[in-house]
Amino acid sequence: MKRSHLLLTLLLSSFFFIQAFSQKDLLQSGPMLGYADMFEVMLWVQTKSPAEVQFVYWVKGNPAQKFFTETAATQKHDGFTAHLIADEVQPGNVYEYELRINGQPVKLAYPTTFQTQPLWAWRTEPPTFKVAVGSCAYINEEQFDRPGTPYGGDYQVFQAIYSQHPDLMLWLGDNVYMREPDWFTRTGFIHRYTHGRSLPELQPLLASTHHYAIWDDHDFGPNDSDGSFIHKDMAADIFQKFWANPVYGLPGQGGITSYFQWADVDFFLMDDRYFRTPNKRKAGDCQYLGKAQLDWLIDALTFSNATFKMVAIGGQVLTSYANFETYINLCPEERAYLLRRIEQEDIKNVVFLTGDRHHTELSKMVNAKGNSIYDFTVSPLTAGIHQTDEVNLLRLDGTLVTQKNFGTMEFSGPRKGRTLTLHIFDSNGVELWSKAIQAEYEGNSGN
């Protein structure tokens, strides 16, 4: 009797092991953490074929009390992606979680944890937290790449970012690179996003860091594409399927404009493609962000009580270099209006977060009110490098980097003495430079 019981136990164990292994075979990419707030967290996953997916989660160290998301069915039309909300959470906790496909747990070789934001206001000083940033992530696919030397490489950068253990990562555009076969069909878009998202080196970072994103031309459509792109609504739809921002687009406007808050910092995620006028157009008003989006940004910055106000835009804002797709080159009047309105409203601690240029630099200007404005350009993650000698009169000495790299931003200090520390690392995680920015307050000019 004992022997038969042991045999049955072994058979059942083998069955469940085989089931778990077979369900892992259905996993295409992820799981990925999306936005995190105090009462809910978004979780994302992609399967290889139609499947039922669900997440189980529990407070770290207390697996006896489990919580369950709803179950979702992945579908081909959506690239077999699913978004599931963990809504039985409390502020300021760390949770462990498990992905289930077709009811069976999927065993992964790296930690799967997420966090909720703490309720700190009126109670404690704002928490210290770290944000990873980067842009221009080209993942090679030989049969569809242009002939010659591969454009992408050094994928270990994602492992280097993971080793920093950031609380969140903000992707600054060109997060995938559409190739010619991808541009004009939903199938092409889904293929390209799936190819990039499935990179093995990326998976641990996806599973334990909360991710937010904007786009630029290469994840919007063809090179230098603009609001005339006939498939821009499809592009926005696929962007939503593969990212997990808290909101997409201003009410009634379309596009992928978004916003979130983390601790005492506001993040404004701008869309520099959906409303854009063609770069080559000779007559008429030039739009980079467009009037509706620009007016919203000014109002939202004016309303904000955040210490630092981080504005993510695909293209460079402050640089004085008038070439390529820099703001000053394409739409100098709109750029001047934006900076003038920031000055008129006396908005302090504005930092633009930008990518696109395939080099990294930090720019700074001080307006007539004495407020410092920064532009932190971080590029590229894995794409080709721009070896530049261009003159940017606002670039801070020692911040130009012409190799593959990523950045982090650490927010620390008391409510009335916050510091933003910027770091740049090479693709192996070696620090190249750092810069501390003191928040400016009334009667205090910061740096």
Image (tube, rainbow, N blue to C red):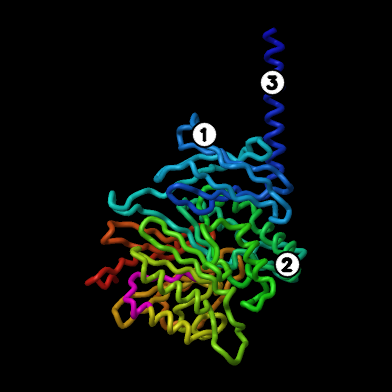
Q: Nearer the viewer, mark 3 or mark 1?
A: 1
Magenta-highlighted residues: 342-355
Answer left or right for 3 relative to 325: right
Look at the image and say whether residue 353 sits in the magenta stretch. yes
Q: Which is nearer the eye, 414 or 231?
A: 231
Q: Which residue is mark 1?
A: 66
Q: Kindly report the distance in space between the C-alpha atoms of the residues bearing marks 3 and 1.
A: 26 Å
Of residue 112 and residue 74, the one placed in the foreground of this image is 74
Direction from residue 121 to residue 314 in the image, left or right: right
Q: Which residue lies at the image location 44% right of the left edge and 63% below the top edge?
A: 267
Residue that appears at 40% across and 45% down? 91
- Residue flagged by tag 3: what amino acid is it? Leu
Image coordinates of residue 24 in percent, x first then y, are: 68, 41
Q: Residue furthest left?
A: 443
Residue 49 part of the magenta-drawn span: no
Against 58, is 78 above or below?
Answer: below
On-image quarter of the C terminus: bottom left
Residue that numbered label 3 is attached to: 10
Q: Position of residue 9 (x, y in %)?
A: 67, 19
